[in-house]
Image (tube, grey):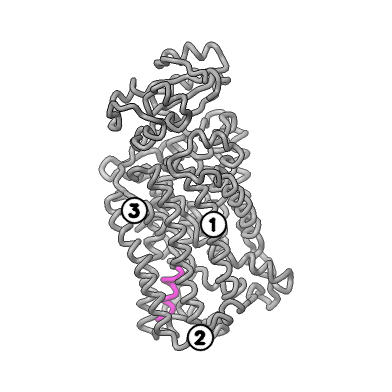
Amino acid sequence: MPAGAIDVHPEKHHPQHAYDDGQPKTASGMEAQMQDQDRLAALGVNSELKRGWGLLENFGSSFSIISVVTGITTLFATGLASGGPAVMAFGWLFVSFFTMFVAASMAEIVSAVPTSGGPYHWSALLAPPKYSAFAAWCTGYFNLLGQVAVTTGISFGLAGVISTIAAMHGYVPSAAKTIGIYAGILVSHGIINTFGIWLLGFFNRASIVLQSAGVGGLAISVLAKAPRLRSGREIFLAFNDGTGLDGVGWGQRASNAYVACIGILLAQYTITGFDASAHMSEETHSAARTAPLGVITAVGASALWGLFYLMSLLASIQNLEDTIGNTVGNPVLKIFLDCFGDPGATIAFAFICVCIYLCGLFSITANSRMMYAFSRERALPGFFDHVESRSSSPVRAVWLAVVLAFCLALPSLGSAVAFSAATSIATIGLYISYVIPIGIRLFAHKRFLEIRGPWHLGATGRPVAAVALAYVGFITVVFCLPQLNPVDRETLNYTPVAVGIIGLYTILSWFLFARRWYKGPRLSEYLDDFLNSCSPSFDLYYCIPSLFSVALAEAALEPGLPVIAQLENEDDKDKVAKVGVERVITQ
């Protein structure tokens, strides 16, 4: 505890606590009984969102956005061209293993800071006070980029799948008409999200069933109906370099290792978006325990289920060359045609469309919650800091998410690799936003120990965070590399351009104007006037007292402490006294 720390008692503003049973409480006992809203109040968050979800729904939000059937089906052609079955199979195992490090580190941070802001709020809380607002600003904008790009990749991929079905039956949509289909999908997502959490809960449970039992049934059906199943040798040793438009791929131009590296995009893009459990934490009961479990179980279940679905497709390929060079527009559809025939393939692909649609629906949901929280901190216009009373939904943020996702897909009208670029942008943007707070947690270990929640990794937390940090650095470089050879205007991977623009904007905007007014996640409204009046030397630490120091518990302080502050200016003591300070803690 810093010398000169002071206590602002929450009971002056929250007279009664549901968990206050009058019995002596240890630090762990206070944590076990702490209510969701008191935890948010301790973090300075005044949430207007309604808590109606449990573990199943929280897990389902991430599981539905990861949606293994979405990523694998829409990027299957990319996988076949970038290494073939061997890279797709081994790449899935490689990516699943290292992504669990990222998920585990994220989960213990979620447990400490279960807010809808997610990564940017974690960065603000974990960073030293001097850099807190800057860390939140940068993390938030990378998370915003990734969230929008994920929505684009999912829903634009669905538009492509619908176009493929239409083409199989004689109608070939132009690029402009595909954009129109995409716009219709986004608008329908916005309408459903407008109706609020009760309707989303219904679709969430339906999505869990379809994404698990439905996809499992589809995989079993493919294996059962395939005329011939490929051997393990034909899967794990079948390498293909289709990255050269002129016949000279990156395997010849560079090396097969280069091809393998860009080939893991299928797996990495698929296992993305599991921060949805964090973004939905303000709408989840017992979020400090439930949200981290939602993250871990969603990634673990998706890794296993995705491997099963992927291997069923790879094993059911009848002729690799024919599948790669298929004339139906999608190699997965070619596999279905070989296994089920025309009517069955159409039905199977229609089922996949439903799964992808639900994936996109919940991507908009998570995206809008992040935008709502970011606007609540005034990093986005305050207009979007609004929750409709009837639906308990941030409707304005929902439609902002829809509009931005539509705009990001417009380059597809003139680019051959726009979809792959969108998936790369989504992957890089999200994982950078994941790893910034993980990196801060790694290097500010003592600060994290003071606020960590009931779900944590113990002594293994720092090594796990270090592996996660190194892995995200690796994939950030890999997914900025050119995917097709030769590189020209149409084949250019504009991922580094988009990521660079966001990076440049966040840094320049911070130093030019944002640092003058953006202070990071705000504290509760009853402290706003006090904070605005304090001198610039006032460093603020906000935390949950029962996790901050045993000394606080021994001092019999009430749980739910919203502020612990270290004073560097004598004048601030008088200002603090005006909001009801009762004692100074010097331990």
Check the image and name the residue furthest to the right: 253
The residue under the point 51% across, 55% down is 149
Q: Position of residue 227 (x, y in %)?
A: 45, 88
The residue under the point 38% across, 29% down is 560
Answer above or below: position of 353 versus 521. Answer: below
Q: Is residue 167 magenta?
A: yes
Q: Which mark is residue 99?
A: 1
Answer above or below: position of 14 versus 486. Answer: above
Residue type at the position of mark 2? Gln
Q: Which residue is mark 3?
A: 57
State the SS at label 2.
Answer: loop
Residue type at the position of mark 3? Glu
Say which of 528 and 272 sits in front.
Answer: 272
State the SS at label 3.
Answer: helix
Is there a contact, CB below 8 Å, between mark 3 and mark 1? no
Sequence order check, earlier mark of 3 and 2:
3
Q: Which residue is mark 2?
A: 318
Answer above or below: position of 99 versus 15. Answer: below
Q: How many marks?
A: 3
Q: Position of residue 240 (x, y in %)?
A: 63, 77
Answer above or below: position of 303 versus 134. Answer: below
